[in-house]
Image: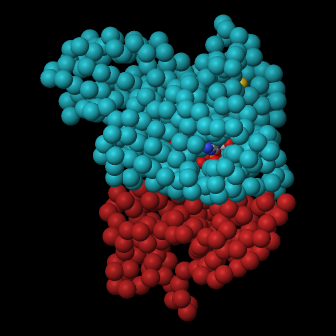
Amino acid sequence: MAQLLQLTLNGRARVDAVPDNLLLLYYLRELVGLTGTKTGCDGGECGACTVLIDDEPRLSCLMLAASVAGRRVDTVESLGEDGQLSAVQRGFHEKLGSQCGYCTPGFIMSSVGLLRRNPRPTDDEIRAALGGNICRCTGYVKIIEAVKHAIELHEAGVEP
Amino acid sequence: MQALPEFELLRPTTLDDARKARAAHPESQIIGGGTDLMVNIRRGIVAPPVLIDLTGVAELRKINADETSLEIGASVTLVELAAHPQVIKHYPVVAEAAAHIAGPMHRNMGTVGGNLCLDTRCIFYNQSEWWRGAIHHCLKTTGDICHVAPKSRGVCFATFSGDLAPALMTLDAEIGVARADGIRAMPLNALYIGYARQDEPQTATRGDGKHFLSLRPGEIVTSVSVKNTPGLRSAYDKIRIRRSIEFPVCGVAVALRRDGDALIDLRVAFTGTNSRPVRLEGTAALCGGTPDARVLQDLDALVRDQVMAMKTTFTPGHYRRRVAGVLARRLVTRLFES
Ligand SMILES: Cc1cc2nc3c(=O)[nH]c(=O)nc-3n(C[C@H](O)[C@H](O)[C@H](O)COP(=O)(O)OP(=O)(O)OC[C@H]3O[C@@H](n4cnc5c(N)ncnc54)[C@H](O)[C@@H]3O)c2cc1C
Ligand code: SF4
Ligand code: FES
Ligand code: FES
């Protein structure tokens, strides 16, 4: 079975025919060709596949593509404008919140979701919001610093 | 890319359509947030030919909460429940349990219905097809032996690990269950039949880790509701291996009332131990005075008697049982003195 999927992907309306059993992760990576969203554990445990659905971080490895009909889906490719990095991207870049980079799109999307609903989170709120993302490289300290830097940039007017 | 088995996805927008879809497809399975079911489909544990997605059913997305009663629709998400100001104020044990489930993305996706009907778990079950096949499938899937207790005589001990059930059970919750021809109400307690007794035959009301819900084919859990008890204090706590994202090693809900220096009402429930969430029996005998060391010792004895944790997780059963007692004692003391 297949359905017509209408959605707003990274700010643009789109229609695709998708099989009922196609996961959102593979819709994004294989059908649309947006490979910024990563496959980590492939089973709901690592957060590498995090995307925003109507601004809420969700795991694309556990969602069916057909279930986001009518919704707004944002991946890491939606961030930044005219070659300028967004506040969260700059935070991770400038504060070394990324090493191998595999977990980074997921951490960035969780952080963007956080800043969109809570522009001035406390340290505890940052930690809680990133609790579903796993990083094998950084030890997390740099990641928290990256998000704090992004908060300052956001306050100075840069989009999250 | 790893292909999923073929299935048809139905997305009803009314409860009526959901019921009809369920009646028309007896082999269907409900999907809420999919944070449990999709993992199991991906691991080849289940392969339902039809999935009925309830997240678009508006009737099931409501929370009605005030100081007298609480009603939660099955498609309400965990994040909505954990953040609801009236739930936090009047039913703290429910909000705390919801906030302790999995990680933030799972709480954005996961639903109340999915949490109440969460599949039971076992280290020999929550594994890939390849892993399970390599040591012979156990009897919760297609095999005929239990790796946890090889002499179990057909009984499965997989563990119920949902966090909302014990919280709601301390408030004597009822659930609504819809089928093609109507809706029935029943105590939440009666949904769970994972008694896993080796000395009794399995029946429709007494099952094990494999047959752990009393739902009949075609039924849908639509809501859960509780009535408030004035003066009730309640809280939830759980131990997990990683504090930010993990199923419970053991989760404990406590609700109690205090009158002067006396404990006059005590309700305790556990998850992550047995094949069903356990509402502790016999707590009335602990009421009447202050919960001193002797009362807490008696509480521990009830826990040791009724909490039966098998080797279904990485933490040994006897450890989970002790943790259950410790968490219960701490919560009772904290709530009594608060
Ligand atoms: C890494 C990880 C950690 C987790 N940690 C926890 C945890 O700490 N505590 C915890 O409780 N859970 C945990 N979970 C499990 C899960 O995320 C939650 O239990 C969640 O609430 C399940 O809800 P859902 O809507 O996603 O369920 P689904 O996956 O959609 O459904 C679960 C089951 O319930 C059935 N079902 C769903 N809705 C209904 C209904 N209305 N009527 C009848 N049957 C229904 C489905 O058919 C399925 O069998 C974790 C999962 C992962 C991947
Ligand atoms: S308790 Fe036994 S039968 Fe049940 S899932 Fe584990 S190994 Fe399988
Ligand atoms: S790939 Fe989705 S959570 Fe790991
Ligand atoms: S930077 Fe390598 S996993 Fe996070």
Q: Is residue A73 left or right of residue B124?
A: left
Nearest to the observer: residue A45 or residue A141: A45
How far across and how far down the image is residue B248, in percent? 50, 36
The N terminus of chain B is located in which quarter?
Answer: bottom right
Nearest to the observer: residue B47 or residue A44: B47
The C terminus of chain B is located in which quarter?
Answer: top left
User: Can residue B337 be seen in this snapshot?
Assistant: yes
**Circle count:** 0
How far across and how far down the image is residue A91, in percent? 44, 76
Is B240 drawn above or below residue A95 in the view shown? Answer: above
How far across and how far down the image is residue B301, in percent? 39, 11
Q: Residue furthest bottom?
A: A82
Chain (cyan)? B
At horizontal 34% and vertical 66% (from top left) the residue drawn is A121
Q: Residue furthest top?
A: B199
Q: Residue furthest front?
A: B181
Is B243 drawn above or below residue A64 in the view shown? Answer: above
User: Can residue B248 be seen in this snapshot?
Assistant: no
Nearest to the observer: residue B311 or residue B212: B212
Is B258 drawn above or below residue A137 in the view shown? Answer: above
Q: Is residue B6 left or right of residue B121?
A: right
Is B10 drawn above or below residue B289 in the view shown? Answer: below
At horizontal 82% and vertical 30% (from top left) the residue drawn is B142
Quarter-of-image position of residue B221: top right
At horizontal 57% and vertical 56% (from top left) the residue drawn is B58
Figure coloring: by chain
Chain (red)? A
How far across and how far down the image is residue B328, in percent? 36, 25
